[in-house]
Amino acid sequence: MKFFIDTANLKDIREAQDLGILDGVTTNPSLMAKQKISGKDRVMQHYKAICDSVDGDVSAEVIATTFHEIIAEGEELAEIDDKIVVKVPMIKDGIKAINYFSEKGIKTNCTLIFSAGQALLAAKAGATYVSPFIGRLDDISVDGIALIEQIALIYRNYSYSTQILAASIRHPMHIIQCAEVGADVMTGPLSVINALFSHPLTDLGLAKFLADHKEAAVK
Ligand code: E4P
């Protein structure tokens, strides 16, 4: 399973990249706003800085919601760098735009996916990635992981090449469960990726190994 980091924070992106396990980045307008990135030039420069900091795909979301505007904005974003994946919302004009981008060879990520039917439409339009938001489903007492499993079954049945990018990851168990049910990619914040490292028995075991080594060296 590929690991993407879900942030527009350059420090976090570089820290995850340094770990050597990072496969890409996802952003959204809320994450960009959190970094106080606004205005077209600054937004474009920031996406370029993200692309320069990571080996792998970088999702950049369009703000437009009508077909021609999505096309114009998406084509501009795609020109920033080969790593850019144009992130498009799951709306009718978005699906039409994904179809257009797919024919042009521009990578896409269909975002705000909350049902298997939406994921099926995105795959039929030729999306490179589809982003089901599992945390936001869990937040309203709907099983987000079950949705990933359902989409994986449907995509397998018809050999769709669209990759399932599990988004809205809230905790390390989400990552494990995504891996169990066959998500192609998970995108989560640095804190959740870092949480995967932790186990008290690892800490205790390492402390004992180092203490034993030190004691043997003294004898
Ligand atoms: C990423 O592609 C999504 O926009 C993001 O994971 C949403 O996460 P949230 O539900 O924590 O805002």
Image (cartoon, rainbow, N blue to C red):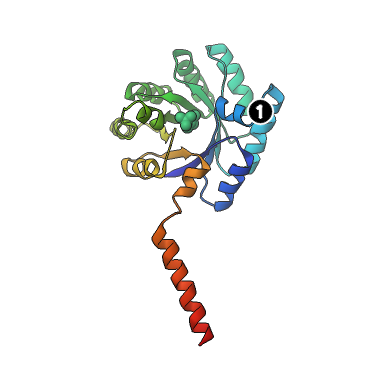
Residue 65 percent coordinates (x, y): 53, 14
* Relative side of 166 to 54, left or right: left
Nearest the camera: 116 or 29? 29
The answer to whether one can see residue 54 in this image is: no
Q: Is residue 164 above or below residue 218?
A: above
Determine the residue positioned at 63% across, 37% down.
Answer: 50
Number of numbered discs overlaid on the protein picture: 1
Which residue is the site of mark 1? 37
Determine the residue positioned at 51% across, 78% down.
Answer: 214
Quadrant containing the N terminus in the rendered view: top left
Residue 216 percent coordinates (x, y): 48, 83
Residue 158 percent coordinates (x, y): 31, 30
Give the residue type that dot 1 points to. Answer: Ile
Q: Is residue 191 above or below residue 166?
A: below
Question: Hey, which residue is sitting farthest bottom in the picture?
Answer: 219
* Relative side of 40 to 74, left or right: right
